Image (cartoon, grey):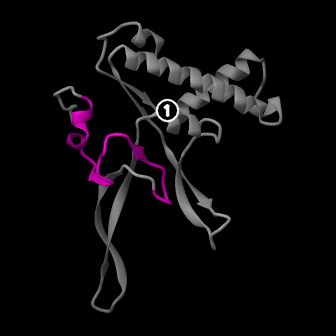
C-alpha cells in the first residue's frame, strides 16, 4: 500500500480484498514482532489492541493513497451474529463484518461508504395464503438497518441494484470494469 501511495498514477483504484484477511496478516505480524505463538497468548485482549494499532497503520497508508489521487476500495466478508438489545424483547440475526470488535469500528469510521451487498428474496402469497420465496436479485444497501451496518456520505438511495453504474460517478473514471 505504501508503494502505491508513493507511485501516483500507477492505478486509479486500489482494492484491498479483504479486510478480514488483512486483519489476519496484522495478527501474524504482531505475533511475529512480539514472538508469540498466537494472539491469545498476550492475555486480557492486549494482543487485539496491538492488532487494531497495526490495522490503523494500514488505514493511514490507505489515506496516503487517497491523498495521491487514487481511490481505495476495501471489501470484507460478513458473518451472521445473534443480536439482542437490552431494551428490546427477543434476539435477531444481524450481519456484521467478519472482523474483531477492535478492528471493525476503525474501518467503519474510516470509510466514506460502508455498503452491504445481499440477495433480496421476494416473498409471494399462494392461492392457499401460504408465503413462499420466489426469485430475487442482488442489491446494495447504503444505510444502517438493525440487521446490517451501512452508511454513505454521498446521498445514495437506501437500496440499489448491484451494478457498478449506480456508483460509477463516485469514482470519476469514465470507464466501467470488465465483466
Q: Position of residue 61 (x, y in %)?
A: 49, 17
Question: Which quadrant of the figure has residue 105?
Answer: top right
At a point 40% along the width and 12% down the height, the residue shown is 4
Q: Dot 1: few (<14), some (14–19), or many (≥20) neighbours within 10 Å?
A: some
At a point 41% along the width and 12% down the height, the residue shown is 5
Q: Position of residue 125 (x, y in %)?
A: 31, 83
Secondary structure state at the residue bearing disc 1: helix
- Extreme-left residue of the structure: 174
Residue with the mark numbered 1? 110
Q: Which residues are magenta?
A: 145-171
Whether the magenta-drawn stretch holds residue 131 is answered as no
Question: Which quadrant of the figure has residue 138?
Answer: bottom left
- Extreme-bottom residue of the structure: 128
Q: Nearer the viewer, residue 80 or 114?
A: 114
Instruction: State left or right for residue 24 relative to residue 16.
Output: right
- Extreme-top residue of the structure: 6
Amino acid at each position: 500500500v505504501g508503494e502505491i501511495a508513493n507511485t501516483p498514477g500507477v492505478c486509479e483504484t486500489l482494492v484491498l480484498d479483504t479486510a478480514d484477511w488483512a486483519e489476519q496478516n496484522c495478527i501474524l505480524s504482531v505475533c511475529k514482532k512480539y514472538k508469540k505463538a498466537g494472539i491469545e497468548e498476550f492475555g486480557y485482549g492486549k494482543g487485539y489492541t496491538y492488532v487494531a494499532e497495526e490495522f490503523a497503520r494500514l488505514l493511514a497508508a490507505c489515506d496516503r493513497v487517497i491523498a495521491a489521487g487514487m481511490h481505495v476500495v476495501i471489501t470484507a466478508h460478513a458473518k451472521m451474529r445473534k443480536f439482542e438489545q437490552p431494551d428490546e424483547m427477543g434476539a435477531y440475526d444481524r450481519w456484521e463484518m467478519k472482523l474483531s470488535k477492535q478492528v471493525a469500528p476503525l474501518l467503519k469510521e474510516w470509510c466514506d461508504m460502508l455498503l452491504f451487498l445481499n440477495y433480496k428474496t421476494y416473498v409471494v402469497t399462494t392461492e392457499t395464503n401460504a408465503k413462499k420465496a420466489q426469485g430475487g436479485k442482488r442489491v446494495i444497501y447504503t444505510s444502517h438497518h438493525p440487521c446490517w451496518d451501512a452508511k454513505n456520505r454521498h446521498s445514495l438511495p437506501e437500496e440499489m441494484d448491484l451494478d457498478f453504474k449506480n456508483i460509477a460517478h463516485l469514482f470519476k473514471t469514465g470507464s466501467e470494469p470488465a465483466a
